[in-house]
């Protein structure tokens, strides 16, 4: 029996992420040896969004609320990685907070997720210079800081910045308060 046949039997003939029964194919969850245990059966919609993150429709991934509880490690790993990818939306982070993975499954999920994050997140300042954790930046426009009751003044240096999962934002301390700043209002020093 081939991998696709095993996956069809395991899944009951539906996408293991969203439950669709149309246009199904095998997706190997990296790193993979090509076995059914390290692969999942996905529909064309899920596969397209996994392979092209720029086309992700976050509303489609509400289905992960069910698939993340699958008994199959490969489905758990893919659900975890997708939730991490869209965690900035808010609701996926709530789901991640409730998800428990066995140690070896967590290691598998984190290995690829860390590589994807490092490859995908490139934060740039207003001039297009790449920002990295630990850099010093200068604010180029007065910014009202919501909830903190002060204005981050133009020309203020923000030292030892931290990157976020969103490439358009950084974290740093201004007036002793840790805040999130949009990179388009910053210049690398």
Image: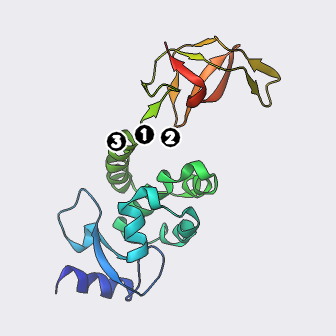
Q: Which residue position is annotated with label 2? A: 165
Crowding at dot 1, Cα within 10 Å, few <14 / some 14-19 / many 20+, comes out as some
Q: Which residue position is annotated with label 3? A: 119
Q: Position of residue 9 (x, y in %)?
A: 31, 88
Q: Position of residue 143 (x, y in %)?
A: 72, 24
Q: Which residue position is annotated with label 1? A: 121
Q: Residue furthest right?
A: 149
- Front-most of 97 and 156? 156
Q: Position of residue 14 (x, y in %)?
A: 41, 85
Image marks 1 and 3: residues in contact by CB distance under 8 Å: yes
Point 80% across, 30% down: residue: 147
Q: CA distance from mark 1 to mark 3?
A: 6 Å
Query: In this view of the protein, can residue 131 be seen by the observer?
Result: no
Residue 59 located left or right of residue 83: right
Q: Which of the colour schemes (rainbow, by chain, secondary structure, one colour) is used?
A: rainbow
User: Between disc 2 and disc 3, whose residue precedes?
Assistant: 3
Image marks 2 and 3: residues in contact by CB distance under 8 Å: no
Q: Position of residue 121 (x, y in %)?
A: 42, 39
- Front-most of 39 and 124? 124
- Front-most of 32 and 184? 184
Q: CA distance from mark 1 to mark 2?
A: 7 Å
User: Between disc 1 and disc 2, whose residue precedes?
Assistant: 1
């Amino acid at each position: 029996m081939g991998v696709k046949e095993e996956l069809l039997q395991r899944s009951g003939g539906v996408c293991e992420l969203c439950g669709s029964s149309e246009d199904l194919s095998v997706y190997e969850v990296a790193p993979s040896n090509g076995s059914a245990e390290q692969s999942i059966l996905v529909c064309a919609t899920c596969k397209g969004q996994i392979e092209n993150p720029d086309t992700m429709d976050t509303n489609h991934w509400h289905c992960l609320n069910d698939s993340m509880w699958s008994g199959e490690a490969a489905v758990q790993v893919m659900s975890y990685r997708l939730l991490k990818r869209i965690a900035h939306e808010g609701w996926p982070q709530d789901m991640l907070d409730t998800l428990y993975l066995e140690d070896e499954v967590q290691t598998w999920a984190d290995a690829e997720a860390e590589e994807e994050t490092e490859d995908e997140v490139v934060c740039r300042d207003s001039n297009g210079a790449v920002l990295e954790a630990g850099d010093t930046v200068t604010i180029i426009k007065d910014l009202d800081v919501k909830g903190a009751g002060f204005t981050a003044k133009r020309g203020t240096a923000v030292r030892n910045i931290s990157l976020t999962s969103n490439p358009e934002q950084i974290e740093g301390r201004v007036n002793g308060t840790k805040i999130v700043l949009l990179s388009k209002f910053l210049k690398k020093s």
